[in-house]
Amino acid sequence: MLEIKNLHAKIDDKEILRGINLTVKPGEIHAIMGPNGSGKSTLSSVLAGSDVFEVSEGSASFYGKDLLAMPAEDRAREGLFYSFQYPVEIPGVSMVNFMRTALNEHRKYNNLKPYTAGEFLKLMREKKNLVEIDSNLTNRSVNEGFSGGEKKKNEIFQMAMLEPRVAILDETDSGLDIDALRIVANGVNKLKSKDTATIIITHYQRLLDYIIPDFVHVLHNGRIVKSAGKELALELEEKGYDWIKKEFED
Amino acid sequence: MTQDKDQILEEVTANEYKYGFSTDIETDTIPKGISEDVVRIISAKKNEPEWMLEYRLAAFAHWKTMEQPNWAKLKIAEIDFQDIIYYAAPKQRPKLDSMDDVDPELRATFEKLGIPLNEQKALAGVASVAVDVVMDSVSVATTFKETLAEKGIIFCSFSEAVQEHPDLVKKYMGSVVPYTDNFFAALNNAVFSDGSFAYIPKGVRCPIELSTYFRINAMNTGQFERTLIVAEEDSYVSYLEGCTAPQRDENQLHAAIVEIVAMQRAEVKYSTVQNWYPGDKNGKGGVYNFVTKRALCKGDYSKVMWTQVETGSAITWKYPSCILMGDHSEGKFYSVAVTNNHQQADTGTKMIHIGKNTRSLIVSKGVSAGKSQNSYRGLVRINKRAENARNYSQCDSLLMGDKCGAHTFPYLEINNSTAVVEHEATTSKIGEDQIFYCNTRGLSTEQAVGLIVNGYVKEVLNQLPMEFAVEAQKLLQISLEGSVG
């Protein structure tokens, strides 16, 4: 379970998150929506452990542990997954090598024996089928020369491999055509279980046609100003964000 | 997090040089300093024929007229050439009947370095490498000689070649790198003590990798070895070179020569993993590495490929080159040069196109960390009559931290309008975003840097023979793990 309390974060003295409160329980899907500059991406990268932002106040606990005290790699090993809005290219590093190193780090952290090459390749095949990723993508270097859609699919593939307890998908739908969107959404739905939770950061309601959220939160000026069920997303789609901006202008 | 990285950098730079031990073995040395007498003593110790002595003396006379070059981007403390011992040899029984006769202390040394001197043992696994081992000034062992001899391949120490195959040595020694070539080459020609010799007869593919392992052990000693490889028509050989030295506070001088001659359709691959002691993290000690390596692609359709992974030495001055004389001959140069702490490297290649339809490829990857300086210096010359010559050069530099430097000095001399010459260069820093991406997948910053650097140099490591590539990869990890700021 992820519990965020009064989270404040800033960059160069500019406060971007100004008291976020959010509780995410196993089995839930939360959508965080909001206009540009509301702090959506900041929230997700702060949770993932980016050192670009400084947390000035508040707390976040992850299954009882102090999330903010952990380096990014330990957050990942504890089961937090962060899907990048702009996945990074790492030339010359094969997906296979990258994923195997990552997965075995997770296993080491959890006192499990590393996978043998055979076990790993078998697992990779299964997960590739699950998320419908082309087999040749995994033969290439990490994200190198991937199209926008391929990069996002690759994020979901990594999520499938790492089996996180909580996944944060940062604008996973941006730059996707309708087919890629469907594949990405199907992947997320297939990976959903009663023990895992998903936080979807998105600008548009489009993705939420495919992944039905249990809760929708609206972020504005670094605070969650409105929370409701999935119908809120439709309302936002219809009315835009202006009424939120007006209602909560400070 | 920046603090973390500094800390990791600190830890990594404190990483001990694994090969820094020295061997306590009785050594036969001569007094310090260089003179005509010293040249004569060395020649006498090796029982050399008169022509060899004459050659050395001519080189020495020429060396005295020369000055140490200073055009490289290197800061070199003055070298006192009279303060160096020019000959040191581990004492052991003069004649070895078999590998079992190798001094146990020596054997232990090389076992510690991971170099098997025991053929039986190597045979138990599948034999893939024959080794000539050079400690200080002499070759102490050569393995698999008989196996190779069955195919007519000669693989022995240079001293032995002078005795046993004088005609070949006379014919080819100095034919690629004459003693007049440069200051350090002249010095080597005067005082060289040993090295390796390989001769691959016509039409023979050498079935195993040939390898020379160089080790400096004795104190205050310079190592001056030379390697000569002759590949006759339609032959093939892959050659490996490795080197280490003990950790000493003084700088040690290493000035070597490698000459390669490739006849028609012959192919030679020469791979180096250079791991001389780089000095401590404050820049004290370390090997001065001044090496002249050159290949002559003499025959039509001959091919030479240099691959080097340079991680050691306080100073590296080295430009493995190809003279593309035969029509359709081909030269390739793949290089990874890693510098950390106070290391300085000025390295690159020369591709001299003389024949028609000659091709060359240069792939150079520099990685600089700490307070090091890393320069690529390369010359591509297309001679007047070299019709349809092609060259492609790619020089990439990767910087870690903000106290190091990367420099690229490409020289292009094109005298034929049919030439196609391309040069690409990039300089990049290891991206914070790349590291963070790896972090979010559960990799530590150290692992991330290791992975990213290995990815960056992969194109070069792929050219190395398998066992060597693994070794090189580990070496890079040790040299650089986490050294990002």
Image (cartoon, coloured by chain):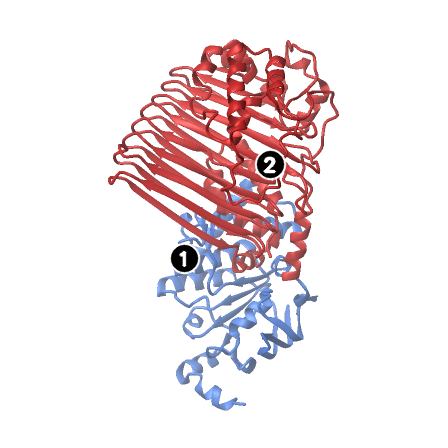
Instruction: Work out whether residue B209 can be spotted.
Output: no
Q: Tell which tag, 2 or 1, sits nearer the viewer.
A: 2
Q: Which chain is red?
A: B
Instruction: Work out whether residue B360 can be spotted.
Output: yes
Q: The blue chain is which one?
A: A
Instruction: Kindly indicate the quadrant of the structure image that contains residue B158.
Output: top right
Q: Callout 2: helix, strand or loop?
A: strand
Determine the residue positioned at 35% across, 26% down: B302
Label 2 to label 1, Cα distance in Å?
49 Å
Q: Which chain carries label 2?
A: B
Residue type at numbered disc 2: Tyr
Residue type at numbered disc 1: Glu
Point out the residue furthest to the front here: B65
Left or right: A159 with respect to B446?
Answer: left
Q: In this view, does B7 lie above or below B252?
A: below
Q: In this view, does B383 lie above or below A110?
A: above
Determine the residue positioned at 67% across, 34% down: B19
The disc placed on residue B288 is 2
The disc placed on residue A150 is 1
